[in-house]
Image (tube, helix red, strand yellow):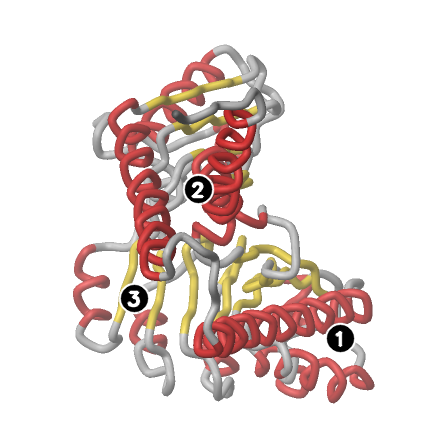
Amino acid sequence: MVCVTARQPIRESMSRFRRYLVPALLLAPVIFICGKLLLTPQRIDGFDVQLSQRGWPWVFLESADVPQAFKPIDISLFWFWKLAADLAVLAAFIALAAVLVYWHRRRHGGRLQITIRTVLLGTAIAGVGFAWWFHEWRYSQRQEAFFTAFGDMLSPLETAHGPLWLQRLTGNEGIFERVVAVQYFGSKPPTELKEPLLTAIAELPSIRRLSFYWDEAHWEELLQEQDLWLLSGFEELVLKNSTFDDHAISLLKKLPKLRVLDLADCRELWAGQFQQLAELPHLEQITLPATTSPETVAYLKRRIRAVNVAPENPVIEDDVVSPEMNALLWKEFRAAVEQGAPNLKPDVANPQPDSASK
């Protein structure tokens, strides 16, 4: 005859609790990471648009806010099938982690045992992760020091935030943020800053692009031959609101690192200048104004590896925003312009008709 005491159910409950406590603690970080990947918003600023996206690996919720408009624009798009696909992928990750925990416990008779090989492997992975984190932290410190020292000449214009999953886990701000383009403002750069500035740029390989407004005032002060050292530290050059002449092209030929040239916002370009641009020694990619003739584009494609034509006043880049959101933004912008939106920037407040609306 078996005697069952009052404490036996309690012991059995505690035994089951201890049995499932360790697997639950091991799976909790995986569930937390998957939830953060799914729900953490990624905020992107483009032109007058403040864009927010949620979802990984597919964006299931996209919203845009344009507070500068005459009538504030607030658009949200939701895709149920993308949410279902995200949940399926993340559930597969959680299920895989659960299978690994179950396999480990079955292999060791339900006990939590860690071998020396597992410890060494985990230490190696953690060491690589911390080394990578320390490298990124040191880079962010050098980047911050650079803009502290030269912020009166160069300001951040465009940043990169790493892969999408990393943005979801860490957010846009932090040590993984990289400035890839800077804006120059001011007049003639001081000669005494030549060596420290070029050395600092060389230590920040992510900064490849220089953008500045090239007009008559800067033409005489900045782009003299003795002042080309400022441009020589960059591989990509973006010229905005600029006029071009033969002297400008002769100076560009003396930039040894220039591989990418963006002339999308330049004015008064003529056929003879395009022929001279094709002779730039190291040029690999060029972006032309939207008004460039097809004959000129075809000619340059035979001489330069990559030739792009700028779209007609995009609201935000197509690789950042979905086509559905871009179409809705254009529709709302046109409606706001018709109502007299006074605070929109000129390039957005006066959009050119795109191919779909012609």
Q: In which quarter of the image is the C terminus?
A: top left
Q: Can residue 49 be seen in this view?
A: no
Q: What x and y, as percent, mark residue 112?
A: 48, 57
Is 203 in front, or is 137? Answer: 137
Residue found 32% across the figure and 36% down from its top: 86
**How many angstroms separate mark 2 from mark 3 (CA)?**
55 Å
Residue found 50% across the figure and 18% down from its top: 74
Q: Earlier in the sequence, mark 2 or mark 1?
A: 2
- Dot 2 corresponds to which residue? 34
Q: Quadrant of the N terminus?
A: top left
CB-based contact (under 8 Å), mark 2 and mark 3: no
Q: What x and y, as percent, mark residue 321?
A: 38, 38
Q: Is residue 328 visible?
A: yes
**How many angstroms separate mark 3 from mark 1 (CA)?**
32 Å
Looking at the image, residue 33 lies above or below residue 176: above
- Label 3, secondary structure: give it: helix
Amino acid type at circle 2 is Cys
Q: What x and y, as percent, mark residue 260?
A: 41, 72
- Dot 3 corresponds to which residue? 271
Is 22 in front, or is 250? Answer: 22
Is 217 in front, or is 29? Answer: 29
Amino acid type at circle 1 is Pro
Q: Give left or right: position of 139 versus 169.
A: right
Q: Which of marks 3 and 1 is nearer the N terminus?
A: 1
User: Which of the two discs, 3 and 1, sits closer to the camera?
Assistant: 1
- Dot 1 corresponds to which residue? 189
